Amino acid sequence: RWCGSPDSPTDLQLAPAAHVPGLLRRWHILVFIGVSAGCALMVVVILIKDPPVDPPRWSSCLVAMEKVSTCQNVALVGGESVLRLESKDECCAACDQNEDCQGWTFSEHDGSCQIFAFQSGSCSEDPGLIQCRCFTHSGNWFGFVPSSGMVWVPQAAT
């Protein structure tokens, strides 16, 4: 007798490859399907458990620029047309507290602060665009609510 012969009932015999179902012969396909289904289920569970939240609103005080204003069409927000405040910091804080505010200007000469929303398409979508601002004289400040992580600001004079 030799191992695996039909005369040896105690010896194990391997079934020929033709008798194994086709899908079992392709075990890697079963593993791929199982892993894919598991990943998809985890993504669904995560999205249901923790839905995406809006990113926090950035402070307009971070981008305060002197000798800059806006030359775009704006609509004042916040009720009063012009606020009388002590500093640019108070002005940008007033903008930050108003959900509709996209930008502000402050004049050190008379303490006037205007908080506003842009009316043009590109500036209303991204108030940080260069074309949303223009240069003016000393004592005038401008800031906007950043809508992205990249903001172009003038380099400080050295």
Image (cartoon, grey):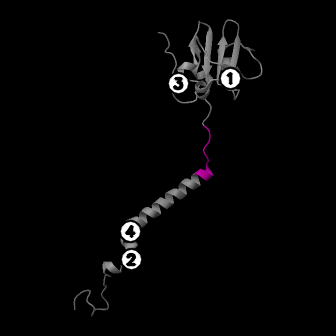
Please state which of the two labelled residues, at mark 2 or mark 1, is closer to the viewer: 2
Whether 82 is drawn above or below 117: the answer is above
Residue neighbourhood size for the residue with mark 1, other residues' Cα within 10 Å, grouped as few (<14), some (14–19), many (≥20):
many
Do callouts 2 and 1 mark residues in contact (Cβ within 8 Å)? no
Residue that badge 3 annotates = 151
User: Who comes first in sequence, dot 2 or dot 3?
Assistant: 2
User: Who comes first in sequence, dot 2 or dot 4?
Assistant: 2
For the residues marked 3 and 1, what is the alpha-carbon distance in whole angstroms?
A: 18 Å
Query: In x, y percent, where is residue 53?
Result: 62, 42
For the residues marked 4 and 3, what is the alpha-carbon distance in whole angstroms?
A: 52 Å
20 or 96, nearer to the observer: 20
> Which three-letter amino acid code belongs to the residue tagged 4?
Trp
Residue that badge 1 annotates = 95
> Which three-letter amino acid code belongs to the residue tagged 2?
Pro
* Dominant secondary-structure state across the stretch colored magenta: loop
For the residues marked 2 and 1, what is the alpha-carbon distance in whole angstroms?
A: 70 Å
